Image: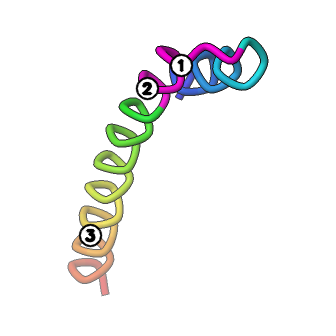
Amino acid sequence: MDEFRKEATDHAMKNNKAAGRRARNASLELTKMFKEYRWVSVEWDKGNK
């Protein structure tokens, strides 16, 4: 999350195109982690009813 925040800020404030690409790549990794968390959370809820 910190990496995304830093790169997105660099892209927005300094118009750094490479930082924009790194921010997009970091956001893809975050999306994967959030999807995995959601899947685990739903499975855990199903098992604890």
Residue 17: mark in rendering: 1
Determine whether, in the image, residue 11 is placed left or right of residue 18.
Answer: right
Quadrant containing the C terminus is bottom left
Determine whether, in the image, residue 12 is placed left or right of residue 20.
Answer: right
The three-letter amino acid code for the residue at tag 2 is Arg
The three-letter amino acid code for the residue at tag 1 is Lys
Q: Nearer the viewer, mark 3 or mark 1?
A: 1
The boundaries of the magenta stretch are: 15-23
Compare marks 3 and 1 and give the one earlier in the sequence. Answer: 1
Residue 35 percent across, percent down from the top left: 31, 59
Q: What is the distance, in whole Å, between disc 1 and disc 2 at their CAs?
A: 6 Å
Q: Nearer the viewer, mark 1 or mark 2?
A: 1
Residue at point 35% right, 42% down? 28
Residue 12 percent across, percent down from the top left: 72, 25
Q: Residue furthest right?
A: 13
Q: Are marks 2 and 3 in contact (CB under 8 Å)?
A: no
Residue on which disc 2 sits: 21
Compare marks 2 and 3 and give the one earlier in the sequence. Answer: 2
Q: Residue furthest bottom?
A: 49
Residue at point 47% right, 14% down? 18
> Is 32 rendered above or below residue 20?
below
Determine whether, in the image, residue 49 is placed left or right of residue 9.
Answer: left
Residue at point 44% right, 39% down? 27
Residue at point 41% right, 30% down? 26
Residue on which disc 3 sits: 44
The three-letter amino acid code for the residue at tag 3 is Trp
Q: Decide: few, some or many residues near mark 2? Use Cα within 10 Å; few <14, some 14-19, many ≥20.
A: some
Instruction: Pick whichever, 42 or 2, lies toward us.
Output: 2
